[in-house]
Image (cartoon, helix red, strand yellow):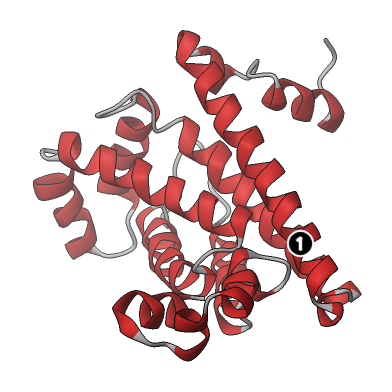
Amino acid sequence: MPRNPFTDVWQFLTGATGDYMALGSWRYLLVALFLALILASLYVAACNCREDPAQRTAMHLGTWFVRVLIGCMWFEGMLWKLPLPVSGGLQYWVEQMGTRAAFEFHRQLVTSFLIPNLYLFGPLIFLAELTFAVSMILGLGVRLVSAIAILFVLHLWLGIYLPGSPEEWSWSYMFLATLMFLFSLYAAGRSLGLDAWLRRHVPAVREGSGFLGWLLKIAG
């Protein structure tokens, strides 16, 4: 099959990419999870449009589209962190950070602490990227999760900063960090996302009452 954006999307949706195939039969579970998240996002967006006329704008639709697209990126990036606890891809790039981080203390931290304990950090990295994906696709807790993602991306930016092979374009990390900053700044989950739905339907979230209500309010 010739490779182009359309065939790449089709292979991703059917679990036929290299990252998926490396997981064996487990890939079908992840494909089902991804499709469920997309369908849930569409349903939440439709509910917001039906219930709140203020959501029916090009700005909210555009914000929703870009947010979901970035969520898909996080989901795809999450795949090569599998299988747990440490995938070959994760091992390789963390080792790269040991020689390519911008600052000596960062390189020392990676080589003396992160790499020896990667079997503990591997699952945490996977869960972090899964959280970013779910949050962006569903529009849930986007302000807080995006702020955490900024720190995550800046760590990658500084960690693979120096020249090496394969070459990395450092601006790509800055662009992603900037997008996450804007998602947090403008509370992108309130554009056709669960954050908007919760504020309308759950008084505790709208008023910030109780711990869970307060947390969801500040998170979204």
Residue 30 vs 124, above or below: the answer is above
Q: Quadrant of residue 196?
A: bottom right
- The answer to whether residue 133 is visible is yes
Is residue 61 or residue 185 the one in the foreground?
Answer: 61
Residue 84 vs 123, above or below: the answer is above
Percent x, y of residue 46: 80, 58
Q: Quadrant of residue 63?
A: bottom right
Residue at the location (37% across, 38% down)? 93
Residue at the location (51% across, 83% down)? 203
Residue that protrudes farthest toward the bottom in the picture: 207
Is residue 91 or residue 140 the one in the foreground?
Answer: 140
Residue 93 vs 112, above or below: the answer is above
Residue position for label 1: 47
- Crowd around label 1: few <14 · some 14–19 · many ≥20 (10 Å): some
Q: In the picture, which quadrant includes the N terminus?
A: top right
Is residue 109 or residue 32 the one in the foreground?
Answer: 32
- The answer to whether residue 172 is visible is no
Percent x, y of residue 90: 35, 34
In the picture, measured across the screen, residue 52 lies left or right of residue 107, that is right
In the picture, measured across the screen, residue 168 lies left or right of residue 4, that is left
Percent x, y of residue 118: 19, 38
Amino acid type indicated by mark 1: Cys
Is residue 25 or residue 105 the one in the foreground?
Answer: 25
Residue at the location (65% across, 15% down)? 16
